[in-house]
Amino acid sequence: MIEAGSPSTWTSLVGAALEARLALRAPSLDDTDFWRTHTAFIQLTQLRRLFKKASRTEFGRAHGFDRMSMLGDADMLREYRRAVPIVDYEGYRSLIERMREGGEPDILWPGLVRDFAQTSGTTSGDKFMPVSKELFKSNYRASLDIFATLMRWGVSLPTMMSGKCLFLGGSTDLSINEHGIRTGDLSGLVTPLIRWPISEVYTPGPDIALMSDWPAKIEAMAQRTIDQDVRMVSGMPSWASVLFARVIELAQERGRSVKRIRDIWPNLDLFVHGGVNYAPFKPRIAELVEGDAQRDLPHRLELYPASEAFVALQDEQGDRGLRLCADHGNFYEFVPVDEIHSDSPRAYAAWEVERGVRYVVVLSTCAGLYRYILGDVVEFDMIPGGLDGLGGDGPLRMRIVGRHRHFINAFGENLIVEHIENAVAKAAETLGVRVGEFTAAPIYPSETTRAGLELAIEAELDNERARKFRDLVDEAIKAQNVDYTTKRTDGLGMAEPKITVLREGAFHAWLDSRGKLGGQHKCPRCANHRDFIEGVIASNPAVVG
């Protein structure tokens, strides 16, 4: 049994060493006036370094990086925008294939890039993001900023490091090709890099972290950590809730009188999360940890990580704003949402954006992506000053408000509208069913429901055929999306989809009730919230569901 406030162990020295290392960084992050006046200069310095580093690559030579690196700040940025178009993954696919599959060096980044992070992309296939040594260092600096931020919040790192730091991670199974190039989830690339003494506070350990079978992995995590003094948890809220529930259940199976995680891990102080909107999960996490849906953990810190780069992190307690990692080797631009699909979208640097405007994130990284559309849509709460250091009100602080096209990513499943449409078409074709309008939305977990996906659809399906349709949709999505497949493994994270069958004309009736019936109005095929699907169902009682 772990006691609250149990004596420190020697690993507290790891926390003390971290505090010593970050003794200057923490107050630097606190100096908001410095970041107000220097963010523009710092960001342009990152861009200039990218040009110098990549000037001899195939891409750098083709776009004149060497010449750009010698221009003044304003001219350099202007020339970069003129020479390099804003593109999505398709603009880099062939070059990345040469790097990853062919083992070709000096294409987008100098030398041979030996690591690629796999993430679900469009229906044309998964995306493989280059992860250079420089990007590993960039991500490492971001991880240090997490601890520097905690210091600013008054969290004692020696106290935290006296216990265990639990990282849920992702699917960490790696593949290595004949060129020695590794491909896998980003966490799988990072896990082997964890060394002593950090390995002494890290749990569940590489043997479990490297497991790709998630049901077995969750069980192994629960078995290993139930008697550990866990003081920090980092991971997706959806998987954290699954683990918390299993740890409580396991403790009860062993005859312990516990009802919440706090009874098992009394010193748990911090939950680090990111990747999805936390709000729908907050009551469930609070209930599991504290036994009270209204009582939050002592500290929570939100991150904005991506396979392409670590973009931002929360720097003020209780504030959703995420502070740009401005000095970590990457350069950021932002394109207004309504221009992202135009032939020549206008891009704005960190000091050029405005409040009240929604922007799509575009980034240039120290791994060889240039003016790449990350796709997240953000708004800004705080904006730095310009090139002259004047104006602004602090560091660039943003809030993620969605994606630039319809998607579902409530639990890290990364579904886009094409995934849903293709799955419905496949199921309808297989069963010979005629379908009408449809929309999909997440099902948020509660005490009585597991996380999942709901599809409301106009179709002629009885209960038996609706179940077959559900299974076909499930399998068709899995065939397109590795992230969804991971979350659906053995139904542990996400439950099987729910099919709600509606009468023909249901969607038109809903649109009519909103005064939007007509050719220019339609219900999105999917959304990362339940507003649309609940509106449709409320207006039209389900036939099956």
Image (spheres, grey):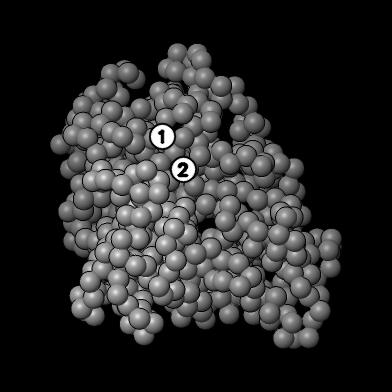
Q: Estimate how packed mark 2 is, as few (under 14), some (14 to 19) or many (20 or more) residues with alpha carbons within 10 Å.
A: few
Q: Which residue is mark 1?
A: 358
Q: Are marks 1 and 2 in contact (CB under 8 Å)?
A: yes
Residue 83 lies, in percent from the top left, at: 19, 30
Give the residue displayed 51% in from the left and 76% down from the top. Answer: 492
The secondary structure type at the circle numbered 1 is loop
Q: Give whichever of discs 1 and 2 has the lower sequence position.
A: 1
Q: Report which quarter residue 332 is drawn in.
A: top left
Give the residue displayed 65% in from the left and 50% down from the top. Answer: 300
Q: Report which quarter residue 543 is drawn in.
A: bottom left
Give the residue displayed 72% in from the left and 68% down from the top. Answer: 261
Above/below status of 219 relative to 145: below
Q: Report which quarter residue 500 is drawn in.
A: bottom left
* Residue nearest the viewer, comparing 429 with 272: 429
Residue 259 lies, in percent from the top left, at: 76, 73
Q: Which residue is mark 2?
A: 401
Residue 427 lies, in percent from the top left, at: 26, 75
Viewed as shown, does residue 178 lie left or right of 211?
Answer: left
Give the residue displayed 45% in from the left and 13% down from the top. Answer: 388
Marks 1/2: CA distance?
Answer: 8 Å
Is residue 310 visible in the rendered image? The answer is: yes
- Inspect the image, locate mark 1, and give the three-letter code of the amino acid beneath it: Arg
* Residue nearest the viewer, comparing 19 with 122: 122
